Amino acid sequence: MGSYKLSKKARTDLKRIWLYGVKTHGNQRADQYHQGMLDRFALIAEQPYLYQAVDYIRAGYRRSVYGTDSIYYQINGGIVEIMTILGHQDTEDWL
């Protein structure tokens, strides 16, 4: 199994997404989405080249879309580092 780590920004993003989910959809759905996101991180770590490279956005970055969010990550020395998780409303500001 591959390994991954979350950047400080990605940890903050994950918490923000969960809190938004609780506010708009309730605890159960927020928890389900959160677990699905963690499952996606594990899949990315297992098969990091499965998802598209987005060098036109940031050099060395790849992106996996989960639900309404985009997970941006890099592969560094065999370890996947999740850099940020953006909803489509956040992407323009980040670019």
Image (cartoon, grey):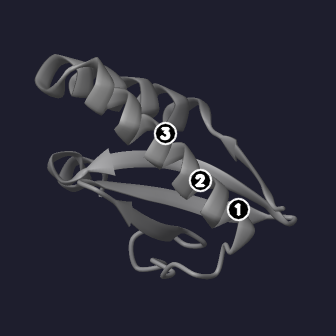
Residue 20 placement: quadrant: top left
Mark 2 Cα-neighbour bin, 10 Å: few <14, some 14–19, many ≥20: many
Q: Secondary structure at mark 1?
A: helix
User: Is 27 in front, or is 7?
Assistant: 27
Which residue does the image show at 60% across and 72% down from the upper left? Answer: 60
Q: Which amino acid type is marked by label 1?
A: Ala
Q: Which mark is residue 41?
A: 2
Quickly name the residue at label 3: 35
Specify whether 95 is left or right of 76.
left
Residue 87 percent across, percent down from the top left: 25, 48
Q: First in sequence: mark 2 or mark 3?
A: 3
The image quadrant where one finds the C terminus is bottom left
Q: Is residue 16 above or below residue 4?
A: above
Quickly name the residue at label 1.
45
Toward the viewer: 81 or 24?
24
Q: Quadrant of the N terminus?
A: bottom right
- In three-dimensional space, the C-alpha distance between marks 3 and 1, rounded to whole angstroms, equals 15 Å
Figure quadrant of residue 92 = bottom left
Q: Where residue 19 sits in the image (x, y, percent)?
A: 30, 19
Residue 58 in view here: no
Residue 21 percent coordinates (x, y): 24, 28
Answer few, some or many: residues within 10 Å of disc 1's Cα (few below 14, many 20 plus, some between 14 and 19): many
Q: Amino acid at mark 3?
A: Gln
